[in-house]
Image: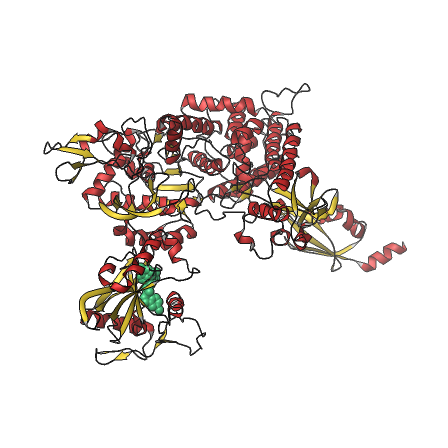
Amino acid sequence: MNLTHTKLQPFPHSPPLTHPTFLFSSRSLLPFPRNLKPAHVSPSFLYKKHTLLRYGCFGVSRSRTRSSISEVEEEQKQKPVLVKRAYPFDEIEPKWQRYWEQNRTFRTPNDVDTSKPKFYVLDMFPYPSGAGLHVGHPLGYTATDVLARFKRMQGYNVLHPMGWDAFGLPAEQYAIETGTHPKLTTLRNINRFRSQLKSLGFSYDWDREISTIEPEYYKWTQWIFLQLLKRGLAYQAEVPVNWCPALGTVLANEEVVDGVSERGGHPVIRKPMRQWMLKITAYADRLLEDLDELDWPESIKEMQRNWIGRSEGAEVEFCVLDSDGMETDMKITVYTTRPDTIFGATYLVVAPEYTLLSSIVSTEQRESVEGYQDIASRKSDLERTELQKEKTGVFSGCYAKNPTSGEPIPIWVADYVLGSYGTGAIMAVPAHDARDHEFASKFNIPIKWVVTPNNGSCVESGKAYSGEGIIVNSSNLKVGLDINGLSSKEAAYKVIEWAAKVGKGKKKVNYKLRDWLFARQRYWGEPIPVIFLEDSGESLPVLESELPLTLPELDDFTPSGTGEPPLSKAVSWIKTIDPSSGKPATRETNTMPQWAGSCWYYLRFMDPKNSNELVDKAKEKYWSPVDVYVGGAEHAVLHLLYSRFWHKVLYDIGVVSTKEPFKCVINQGIILGEVQYTACKDTYGNYISADSADDLGEYLQEIIPEERVVKSGEFFVLKDNPNIRLIARAHKMSKSRGNVVNPDDVVSEYGADSLRLYEMFMGPFRDSKTWNTSGIEGVHRFLGRTWRLIVGSPLHHGAFRDGTLVTDEEPTTEQLRALHKCIAKVTEETEGTRFNTGISAMMEFINAAYKWDKQPKAIIEAFVLLLSPYAPHMAEELWSRLGHPDSIAYKAFPKADPAYLKESTVVLPVQINGKTRGTIQVEKGCSEEDAFTLASQDEKLSKYLNGKPIKKRIFVPGKILNVILDRQNVKAGSIQ
Ligand code: ANZ
């Protein structure tokens, strides 16, 4: 899956910073021009806007900022590497990676002991892009790796695989530009991704690696397509599609943003074309209902619900009138969710693409209607339905009869009604629908009120009242319908009942969900296993026994430009014979969309080498469902919905045993680039504080290196001039901004364990976070401290020691308490995927352990086990130095002993003659005598007690010690 796909990401620009160090008040600092709202303006735009205003061109200021950026870069280049190796990670990490590889440590055998519990933890597999991994990838991958290692140690059979979602447009685009076969590019990228992942020490079972481009894999993608075809769930249709002439291909709605292609920004138009469609709508109800059982983020479930968009209403027929006002045979059926408002329907609207439109439209109006249709065909659905957009439309020249009021009402054509939803026609009720109200006001169409608010409150004048209420003005005894005085619900029910009785309508459920457009005019995808008989054009499925239908070799990948896919150039591949009739046939030249391969890969991982079946039944039964599925929120809707759909089809045909594929889905947050500080300057080059920059109108900006910045209260200011507040912002990592952090660099400077630990420590796993180099230095120091505690400091000439410093001594109670507290916390936090707080607990333990004279082996060993899911290389090394010949990976995760978790001491207030004079720390269950002794030894209390005769002691265990002095004797004593 492509992590760079950003459409559904929750924070497209800059989310609030969560790292405590970077809290700042963005409202007061942002230099927004007065007429622009911050949320709508990207910071880069702002920068350009200001400088452009000032100088009338980009040149001057851009070059200034360039020079500031390059100064920073130059400084950074000259900066000595801040961190010395805190421990020999560069020796340890490759060593253990080799060990794991040679010993196939993380291989999940084919024949696992199924009496043991299982844990299937899966990452959304990546699209192997040419750019390689970025630091966003390891965030999710480290989390799943921690869970996989943790569960292995808890005795589960763990399935933790990795593979490649390897078909896709970039490789094809690259092929078009360079002539390099997409397979070559893709394999090269896969190799890079694999070695990067290995360098991070992830415990994937590499024996199960799969790639969607391999024929052994896509054989089964094609097989699933044939099952869909067999059940009428795959069909062909002429549908208006998003046609992108520049890419020479059809795009899915999600691939079109503001009328241009998401990739490349090329114009997109609507064009009818023969397409393969998958009938996902047949599963709409189940896809909706089964969401309730899933342990998924509520936000994703809600997005899926909205995407499916179940709507309950009615279809009602309106009879078209001729020019004399007489009823014709022609009917317009509308879909409405508010049948209660039918008496208020003062006009009808049909979509510009409404099929019957040409037979309705009057001769006088034909030209303007056709002109309007043409304009509308170039707009996307999103553009057309935007609420704020001014409504447009043309009169068809024709009328229909409102079946309830009996009145003739005009039929209009307007693009705010979509041909693809409901029936493509609506009854417009301007009094009670905002869009209709706006339209009717603009075109002087009557507005008739038929609903009054229940509570008698007034309706805002000049606006529609869209709520429910009590029905008025809605009775026509001629047609036998009177709904006056009823509530909206009762009225809706009665109207549907009436319409059904008179044969003019029925109840209807609609879905926003559309059938899935399942064909692409591209080369680099799975061939669709269908042939067309040359004589009749009839389409036939390729025989299952002939699968995989492999993608033919091709030298020219360019789209034909006519919509004919590149595969049409594979002339000898296209020509075939229908095996059953012997007739000549041609192959389908469309390929499947990239979503296809990712719809079911989680099943193949259970049994990746099976050449007879998609997945062995017993294996599927054992491993299903995926227990934890981690990936970006950008896949919240489509990928998860498509795979749920395929899974349900496979469930219906007995291939899988569960109704749902993914029990728990977790979205990791986004990692934003390092915070960037910017100072504002007036036109003379003087710094001005960011909070007053707005008053200046236009100003320049200069990027300030971190060394020149200090925090002052909640703001950041210039170190040498604290009156100058700076703008602090974290941006999404992007090549163009130059703030991408490459994991390879981090690994070579700090080691993989530091990167892993840092990404887990940055903040709550699901939150967005900002990258911060000093943060990684912090966790690196922690690992260094851990190393020195257990192994010792480097020798005087800098070499790292062998062996360890641990002793065979029995641990003290204090040590056991610290350890078990740490075990309990790490276990609880890891289980709850609160990795950052789990790491904090380990840091606390190390701090405590530094105070001990001796490090008993029993304590240290247990700690190393706790550390191992997070920093596996260091843990393996320490484990081996502690005398264990084999890997730590399957050793039992320590269990906290509750006996050591109870708080062992209490703070006891001590009163002298009823007055509290101090406190003492005592063991729980401490005796009166011991408490008194401790009080007498206490520096503060001793002066009240020592040498004083005591009359009585009142002791409530764990609560209080009250000492009553014998005053008489005190006095007597003093006389003596
Ligand atoms: C009359 C009416 C009166 C409506 C009223 C609403 C309020 P959902 O909930 O999204 O399903 N509609 C139906 N088909 C449409 C189409 N193809 N394009 C645009 N709008 C369409 O909304 C259903 C409502 O949206 C329907 O109910 C219809 O307007 C409109 F006071 O009918 B209603």
In this view, which residue lies farthest toward the right?
975
Q: Is residue 658 visible?
A: no
**876 to the left or right of 616:** right
| Residue 822 percent coordinates (x, y) | 55, 40
Image quarter where the N terminus lies is top left
Quarter of image, res 459:
bottom left
Which residue is at a point 42% across and 21% down the rendered structure image?
Answer: 102
| Residue 378 percent coordinates (x, y) | 35, 51
Number of numbered tags placed on the structure image: 0
In this view, which residue lies farthest toward the bottom?
477
Q: Is residue 618 visible?
A: yes
**242 to the left or right of 196:** left
Colour theme:
secondary structure
Quarter of image, res 65:
top right
- As rendered, which of 658 and 47 lies closer to the eye? 47
Quarter of image, res 372:
bottom left
**583 to the left or right of 200:** left
Compared with 800, 772 (above or below) is below
- As rendered, which of 865 and 272 lies closer to the eye? 272
| Residue 13 percent coordinates (x, y) | 52, 47
- As rendered, which of 160 and 885 lies closer to the eye? 160
| Residue 600 percent coordinates (x, y) | 31, 39
Name the quadrant where ligand 1 sits: bottom left
